[in-house]
Amino acid sequence: MPPDHDQKPILQRLVGHHSIEVRLDTAGRITIPEDMAAAADITNMAVLAGSLRHFELWSPARFAVLEEKDKPEQVNVLKRVRAL
């Protein structure tokens, strides 16, 4: 969605509605709530992927599938960025 789209705030609230606050434990770690971990197929390992202004947590298997899906377009995306 373009940054200036009039419905962007609605989308942000919709996505943010499913966000939660978590506390760090004494070692500085966060615990992923069980229901969220289960919905994302995260068990004992997770991929922390940076995405410019936020980060994403993925199950390693799901992230591998996403990377494979993205591969064909990566060269085209880089070409577009270089052309800017």
Image (tube, grey):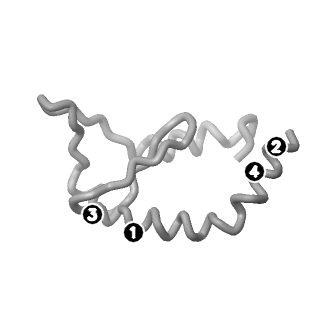
- Chain-order first, disc 3 or disc 1: 3
Q: Is residue 19 left or right of residue 51?
A: left
The residue under label 4 is 78
Q: Position of residue 29 (x, y in %)?
A: 21, 37
Q: Are marks 4 and 1 in contact (CB under 8 Å)?
A: no
- Of labels 4 and 1, the one closer to you: 4
Q: Are marks 1 and 2 in contact (CB under 8 Å)?
A: no
Q: Identify the image quadrant of residue 17.
A: top left
* Mark 1 vs mark 2, CA separation in Å: 31 Å
The residue under label 3 is 38
Classify mark 4: residues with Cα within 10 Å, few (<14), some (14-19) or many (20+). Answer: few
- Residue at (21, 59) in percent of width and height: 44
The residue under label 2 is 82
Compared to 47, does 20 lie above or below?
A: above
* Mark 4 vs mark 1, CA separation in Å: 25 Å
Identify residue type, mark 3.
Answer: Ala
Q: Are marks 2 and 4 in contact (CB under 8 Å)?
A: yes
- Of labels 3 and 1, the one closer to you: 1
* Mark 3 vs mark 1, CA separation in Å: 13 Å
Identify residue type, mark 2.
Answer: Arg
Identify residue type, mark 1.
Answer: Ala
* Mark 3 vs mark 2, CA separation in Å: 39 Å
- Chain-order first, disc 4 or disc 1: 1
Q: Is residue 42 left or right of residue 25?
A: right
Helix, strand or loop at label 2? It is helix
Identify residue type, mark 4.
Answer: Leu
Q: Which mark is residue 61?
A: 1
Classify mark 2: residues with Cα within 10 Å, few (<14), some (14-19) or many (20+). Answer: few
Q: Identify the image quadrant of residue 21.
A: top left
